[in-house]
């Protein structure tokens, strides 16, 4: 299924809103060993995603033939994605929260649109557009207003920076393998690879000694997080990301803290404070400017999907292999006649 740009925008918005609105549910599992719980969440999600791959091989393939297993290069990228954007991201959050207020951590993560607007085009061999970088900066400013201010020591700041890097790596690395593998396979393999990495990190964290069976509430929460915050949100985000590109989709990451704020306000039964309301409006302006930023003439002339009809890769970014040229039988015959 090939999606249009408006549909891709809606999918990215839905993915970020779903993640942001689900943050409050995570409070229900704070007493459970964090890394072990995340491993269980990704394990459940991987089982569902691989079932989708088996039952619907061409699901969200974008019109390209369903691929087989990831090749060696793609497996390295997916492992790095699971290490940095999933296991590393969760570990950094775990380290940061005792040393920094959640608002500080959220502000660092909310700066991801600016990093994606800069790094996304660079990895594709393009220059970042000033309008898109400016839009990402507006989104970051709005996110900072939404999150507010708070305390943080050196450890908290460094761990928050690590979470910021993990958030950028999540989309940047996924974009490198989405053209051939598609959203379902990227989500399935990255979730499966994150499980052993999280369990390996849980050992030095002492979680094995504190392991216990989850309560009924924790089991239901992990099930929801696996189904909605992982399977549905990942598929929506990866599908939109594949169509829009890292830089344009990246500005929509700013919706995540906004969705968290609005969900918390609804649960509390009171509106956000004036500063946070202004932050929501500023972030909205930045997102509108970013989505309205047109691609350059060269980008409009080139196809968005780097997967040609023949199934060969083209070097559209730093992660892709060199171009392989396939000549037709007719062109070979012409060359032979010219040689004679």
Image (tube, rainbow, N blue to C red):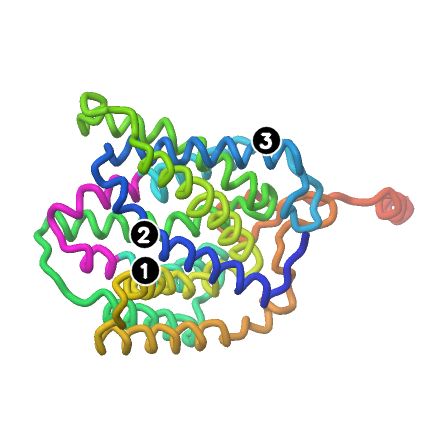
Q: For this view, does 304 lie left or right of residue 15?
A: right
Q: For this view, does 303 lie left or right of residue 109?
A: right
Closest to the observer: 257 or 311?
257
Closest to the observer: 330 or 77?
77
Quadrant of res 305: bottom right
Say if mark 1 contacts mark 2, CB within 8 Å.
yes
Q: Which residue is mark 2?
A: 23
The numbered mark, 1 or 2, whose residue comes first in the sequence reads: 2
The numbered mark, 3 or 2, whose residue comes first in the sequence reads: 2
Please state the horizontal and vertical placement of residue 111, each as a whole percent of the image. Answer: 30, 62
Magenta part of the protein: which range?
88-108
Q: Secondary structure at mark 2?
A: helix
Label annotation for residue 327: none
Q: Residues within 10 Å of mark 3 (few under 14, many from 20)?
A: few
Image height check: is 128 above or below 200? below
Q: Which residue is mark 1?
A: 260
Q: Residue at x 42, y 55 (%)?
A: 18
């Amino acid at each position: 299924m090939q999606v249009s740009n408006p549909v891709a925008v809606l999918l990215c918005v839905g993915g970020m809103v779903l993640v942001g609105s689900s943050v409050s549910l995570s409070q229900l599992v704070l007493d459970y060993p964090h890394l072990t719980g995340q491993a269980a969440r990704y394990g459940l999600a991987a089982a569902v995603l691989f079932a989708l791959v088996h039952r619907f091989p061409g699901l969200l393939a974008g019109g390209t033939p369903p691929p087989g297993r990831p090749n060696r290069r793609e497996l390295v990228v997916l492992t790095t994605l699971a290490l940095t954007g999933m296991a590393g991201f969760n570990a950094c959050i775990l380290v940061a929260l005792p040393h920094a207020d959640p608002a500080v951590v959220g502000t660092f993560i909310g700066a991801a649109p600016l990093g994606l607007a800069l790094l996304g085009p660079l990895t594709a061999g393009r220059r970042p557009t000033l309008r898109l970088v400016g839009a990402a900066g507006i989104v970051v400013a709005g996110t900072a207003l939404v999150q507010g201010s708070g305390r943080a020591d050196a450890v908290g700041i460094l761990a928050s920076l690590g979470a910021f890097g993990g958030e950028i790596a999540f989309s940047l690395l996924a974009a490198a393998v989405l053209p051939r593998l598609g959203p379902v396979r990227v989500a399935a393999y990255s979730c499966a690879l994150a499980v052993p990495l999280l369990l390996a990190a849980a050992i030095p964290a002492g979680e094995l000694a504190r392991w216990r069976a989850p309560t009924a509430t924790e089991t239901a929460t992990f099930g929801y997080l696996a189904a909605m915050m992982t399977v549905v949100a990942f598929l929506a985000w990866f599908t939109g990301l594949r169509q829009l590109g890292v830089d344009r989709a990246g500005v929509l990451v700013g919706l995540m803290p906004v969705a968290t704020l609005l969900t918390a306000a609804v649960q509390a039964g009171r509106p956000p404070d004036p500063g946070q309301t202004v932050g929501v409006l500023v972030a909205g302006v930045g997102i509108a400017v970013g989505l309205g930023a047109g691609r350059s003439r060269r980008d409009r002339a080139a196809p968005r999907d780097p997967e040609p009809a023949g199934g060969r890769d083209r070097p559209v970014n730093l992660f892709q292999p060199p171009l392989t040229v396939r000549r037709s039988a007719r062109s070979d015959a012409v060359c032979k006649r010219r040689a004679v």
